[in-house]
Image (cartoon, rainbow, N blue to C red):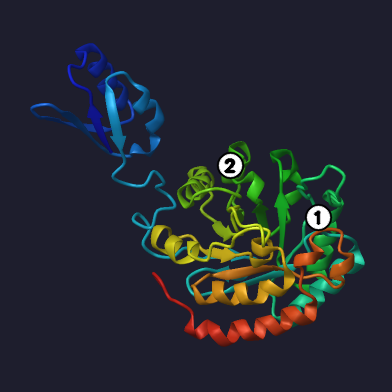
Amino acid sequence: MVVLLKKNIDEKQLNRLINWLEDFNIEIHMSQGMNTTIMGLIGDTSVVDIDLLKALDIVEDVKRIQEPYKNANRKFHPANTVVNIGGVKVGGGDFALIAGPCSVESLDQMKQIAKDVKSGGANMLRGGAFKPRTSPYAFQGMREQGIEVMMEARAVSGLPIVSEVMDPSQLKFFEDVDLIQVGARNMQNFELLKELGKLRKPVLLKRGLANTLQEWLMSAEYIMAGGNEQVILCERGIRTFETATRNTLDISAVPMLKSLTHLPIIVDPSHGVGIAKMVPPLALAATAAGADGLIIEVHNDPPHAMSDGAQSLTPEAFAELVTAIRNILPFAYKSNE
């Protein structure tokens, strides 16, 4: 990190700044020019609040030479991370296919869908028990009962289960969930991320509706800084000016993230566009771009789904898509493998 100081600075203020930085075990190199004084900071500068530095009276500007995320950074961890979820590996060449309905609706539904998506090629089962909905009148999920239903569906199918947590108080219900999902609305719920960092359980972290890649990686850093390195990133579309689709699926995030981080990256084309007929081509595009997996909404009766039926594939359509995915996987873009 480089700190550019203003002209005619107060020595007492400078000394206080130096002492403050040294408390973080940061080495300081001063460079005095004719009109400019530059401080070069060497060490783990991720602990320094860059906005606080910029606000100081004696500071003109601050520039990071290195990204502020350390644990998620490929520079410090060149090898790809492989996350194991109940025997299913994600990353490093292993491709995940997660499928299931947006919401858990009943035990019979989940048992049948679990069997259908497994026969169609899925190796993990998704289902929302706690549902964040824009409208307070919309179906909010079966909550803890939905988790119990998911576990019964796992017993029937043998598929590891994936479900979304919304609040730290709900984590007690997720002890037997194989992969805990953090949804887009909670990507910057830092108290939740801190609690997930204390666990030793895989976490699927979705990108926020309007977040940059660096902000997303900093959220992953919250989890990893707590000691939990089992993080999978999920691109699920961002909000742009376009209204023809629910969101704009950022396929470019896949190869870009591969250069920035060692964490696995999967793609959710269902939420990316919100239109079922567009899910297959975008799933194939994500696969070709080098994604480590896909999460796809599948419902046995989409027109009557209690949430997100418009973007859900039927089990038959899902099985057809999986065949196409397997055909292009050998030709998918390989980056940092």
In the picture of the structure, the residue carrying the numbered disc 2 is: 188
Residue 29 percent location from the top left of the image: 17, 32
Which label was assigned to residue 218? Answer: none
Residue placed at 75% from the left, 80% from the top? 317
Q: Along the horizontal axis of the image, is 78 left or right of 234?
A: left
Dividing the picture into quadrants, the one containing residue 34 is: top left
Callout 1 amino acid: Ile
Q: Residue at x 43, y 50 (%)?
A: 71
Kindly identify the residue that appears in the image at 81 percent across and 45 percent down.
Answer: 135
Visible residue check, residue 123: no
Q: Horizontally, is 300 left or right of 221 in the view?
A: right
Q: Which residue matches tag 1?
A: 147
Question: Label 2 amino acid?
Answer: Gln
The answer to whether any part of residue 297 appears in the image is yes
Residue 236 lies, in percent from the top left, at 61, 59
Q: Quadrant location of the N terminus? A: top left
Among the 4 quarters of the image, the one containing residue 98: bottom right
